[in-house]
Amino acid sequence: MADEGAPFRHPIDWRNPEFYDGEALERETRRVFDICHGCRRCFSLCDSFPRLFDLIDESETGELDSVDSSGFKSVVDACTLCDMCFMTMCPYTPPHEWDVDFPHLMLRHRAADRRAGRRHTTASKRLAETDRNGRLARTFAPVMNWGSARDNRLTRPLMEAVAGVHRDAPLPRYQRRTMLDRAAKGGPAVNRQAPANGRKAVIYATCFANYNQPEVGAAARKVLAHNGVETVVVYPRCCGMPQLEEGDIERVADNARHVAGALGEWIDKGYDVIALVASCALMLKLEWPLILPEDPAVKRLAEHSYDICEYVVGISRSDGLAPGLAPIDGGITLHLPCHERAQNVGRKSADMLALVPDTEVSIIERCSGHGGSIGVTKGFHETALKVGRTTARRAREAANPYLASECPLAGAHIVNGMARQAAKDGDPAAGAPAAGRAHHPIELLARAYGLA
């Protein structure tokens, strides 16, 4: 009999030796996999579930009891920790007595593999070092961007052979001037006539906005300043999502303590905390408190953290936005990434773009397939394209000049998938949005204000 009550997640018991014990993990995996086998609601979410069900269906008895445990690795490898099975599909999450949390079970496998010296991919360890990569790459940004360009037939095959990065996967470009560098030159003037004047927010730049797309941070600061919000930019360290994907929970915990301490000083001064990337907002608000449930600084940060779109929508509802929004020529195709949806605050990027007058917004609420750093690896990129095929097709069918996603990796992956499908159809010109790239929704709001 299921218990009543809203779904919740248990703290991650990563400091308990049993968390890594092979026999205990085997028992729990078989228990959960047997429940998944009897349900199968998640078969269309990602590649983990088709792999699991194929293992069972092709076994001697057609049941889990005849599946060798060695086959479980393929299921674990395909999980992107998107949390969608837990958030949107699974009827057996806590407080149900069956107590199923599939993503955190996959995380436990990765953590156990890491402790035993095993890895689930060949390339993601290098890709996961976002701060190191960003610091090095900014010095040689033109050379790095030349070498990582997909059309570079000299370097990309070499990267595939040496680093395990698929030669056709789009890679983020690096900037010489980081978001912190640009913020040091000063910020936009605050509109003292705006209804929300008096608010203060510290923008947690995130590794991606700092090193790869500082224009997202610039757009956010302009929109907030126009709406009376004073902002500062802080970037103590990466949120640790790439390390979470690797099962390095101790490293994530260390990052959480460090960042929570740095941002806590701004909370003391009356500042709200805003994250620019959905994955990072998810870490601050939900994953860190499950990893360090006893840490008051982490708990306090979670209570004061907002996703950028969530924050703007909050201003519109409590104070009202400053006037000046104008229609955006043509429509917008908005992808709702998994880590936006997993924050469980509603479709805030859609709510925000709905504030733009006389502009049609076509919403795609489906996984892009990318899955973080694993999405560009030689072993997974084609799978990522397969999982995201429907999303790319819907984006092509919408045929809007603008494509937007709060996840920059998802946005680039969708554009890549659109181009792949267009080339297969013999119509390469229809393979990308008219703007040539995916935007962050806050960039389009800045455009509607005439700020970009």
Image (spheres, rainbow, N blue to C red):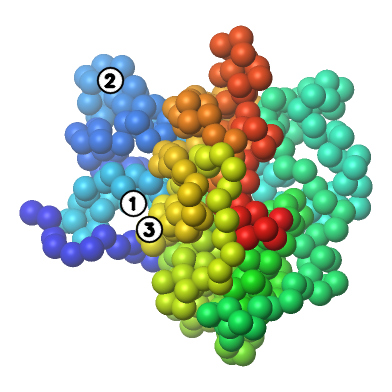
State how far apart marks 2 and 3 are (Cα): 37 Å
Nearer to the camera, 282 or 419: 419
Q: Residue furthest top?
A: 426
Nearer to the camera, 362 or 254: 362
Residue at left offset 71%, top offset 72%: 233
The vertical placement of 314 against 131, above or below, is below
Residue at left offset 69%, top offset 78%: 190
Amino acid type, mark 3: Gly
The vertical placement of 223 against 37, above or below, is below
Q: Is residue 206 left or right of residue 65?
A: right
Residue 221 picture location, percent across and down: 68, 68
Q: Quadrant of residue 145?
A: top right
Count the labels in the image. Answer: 3
Q: Quadrant of residue 99?
A: bottom left
Nearer to the camera, 408 or 386: 408
Q: Nearer the viewer, mark 2 or mark 1?
A: 1
State how far apart marks 1 and 3 are (Cα): 12 Å
What element does badge 3 sit on? loop
The C terminus lies in which quarter of the figure? bottom right
Amino acid type, mark 1: Met
Residue at left offset 85%, top offset 33%: 147
Residue 219 picture location, percent across and down: 68, 60
State how far apart marks 2 and 1 are (Cα): 26 Å
The answer to whether residue 99 is visible is yes
| Residue carrying label 2 | 57
Q: Is residue 190 left or right of residue 88?
A: right
The N terminus lies in which quarter of the figure? bottom left
| Residue carrying label 1 | 87
Residue neighbourhood size for the residue with mark 1, other residues' Cα within 10 Å, grouped as few (<14), some (14–19), many (≥20) = some
Q: Earlier in the sequence, mark 2 or mark 3?
A: 2
| Residue carrying label 3 | 346
Residue at left offset 22%, top offset 40%: 35
